[in-house]
């Protein structure tokens, strides 16, 4: 199994709009380090049979998939409905054409309710065989449920995102936990025995109201003891080289296009 990090930034991307010359605000990151250039957070599970399961549709989805050499998508999971995780929705129409059908997609009932309100056209039946708009075939799941997608068993976890709820995902001994600020005991139990944990980490210091900061993440790592931890959804404080030098063994910053592989 592989986990491909398509994008690793917070909701504003890196660099953010602005800056002294209008070409981007890099915050505390070094603009000469290419791994500090980050798109919004999406990821892909790639199975040993080369099936591709997409997690969220970031605004830069087309650029992400082509940059990472991902030829198609076989299924989709939505973790929640914030704009940085769903605004690439219209790129699904090309994926529909590649698969020749509606995209199987998995999310909780509240996510489907919101997406049907904002993207109603996605859920209407297609007329004919040409996909001029995205079409999803929705499957409703419950946080905490195990689901099988393209032969892969995915354990879902409810997460505290401050003012809302999100889904964490585990398959085998790897987990992808995006957009959370606190973990409850049920989630900690579901994250035992990991070879790989990819985890939300927005800031160097204190927690954001909806995202964990580095001290909180390192406390989780100490408690859960995954073999390897990779940080994602990083904000403008999170310089790649600074993190590489400061983080303890087994913990590292992610970057766009990073490919992580776990046996089994």
Image (tube, helix red, strand yellow):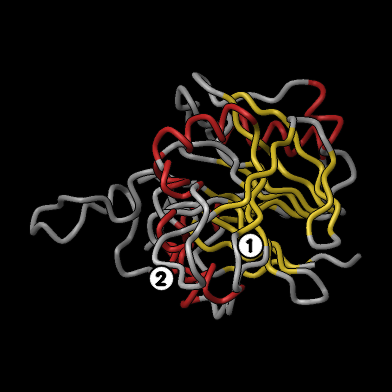
Residue 28 placed where, x, y %?
Answer: 32, 48
Identify which residue, 56 or 214, lies in the foreground: 56
Residue 70 placed where, x, y %?
Answer: 58, 76
Mark 2, residues whose alpha carbon is within 10 Å: few (<14), some, or many (≥20)? Answer: few
| Residue 256 position (above or below residue 124) | below
Q: Is residue 53 left or right of residue 144?
A: left
Residue 142 placed where, x, y %?
Answer: 74, 30
How many numbered marks are there? 2
Residue 57 placed where, x, y %?
Answer: 49, 54
Q: Which residue is labeled 1 in the image? A: 44
Toward which corner of the image does residue 39 lie, by quadrant? bottom left
Instruction: Spot the residue most to the front.
Output: 128
Label 1 vs 2, first from the N-terminus: 1
Q: Residue at x 69, y 31 (%)?
A: 219
Q: Which residue is labeled 2 in the image? A: 63
Q: Residue at x 60, y 53 (%)?
A: 55
């Amino acid at each position: 199994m592989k986990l491909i990090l398509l994008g690793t930034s917070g909701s504003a991307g890196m660099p953010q709009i602005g800056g002294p010359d209008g070409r981007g605000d890099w915050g505390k990151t070094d603009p000469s380090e290419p791994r500090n250039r980050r798109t919004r957070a999406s990821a892909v599970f790639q199975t040993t049979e080369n099936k591709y399961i997409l997690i969220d549709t970031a605004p830069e989805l087309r650029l992400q998939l082509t940059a990472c050499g991902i030829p198609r998508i076989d299924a989709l999971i939505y973790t929640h409905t914030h704009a940085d995780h769903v605004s690439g929705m219209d790129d699904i129409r090309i994926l529909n054409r590649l698969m020749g059908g509606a995209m199987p997609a998995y999310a909780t009932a509240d996510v489907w309710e919101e997406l049907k309100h904002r993207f109603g056209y996605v859920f209407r039946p297609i007329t004919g065989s040409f996909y001029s708009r995205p079409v999803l075939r929705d499957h409703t799941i419950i946080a905490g449920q195990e689901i099988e997608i393209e032969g892969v068993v995915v354990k879902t976890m409810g997460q505290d995102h401050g003012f809302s709820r999100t889904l964490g995902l585990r398959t085998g001994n790897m987990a992808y936990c995006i957009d959370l600020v606190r973990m409850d005991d049920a989630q900690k139990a579901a994250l035992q025995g990991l070879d790989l944990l990819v985890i939300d980490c927005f800031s160097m210091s204190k927690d954001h109201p909806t995202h964990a900061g580095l001290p909180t993440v390192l406390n989780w790592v100490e408690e859960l003891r995954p073999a390897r931890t990779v940080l994602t959804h990083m904000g403008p404080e999170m310089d790649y080289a600074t993190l590489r030098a400061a983080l303890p063994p087994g913990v590292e910053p992610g970057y766009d296009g990073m490919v992580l592989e776990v046996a089994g």
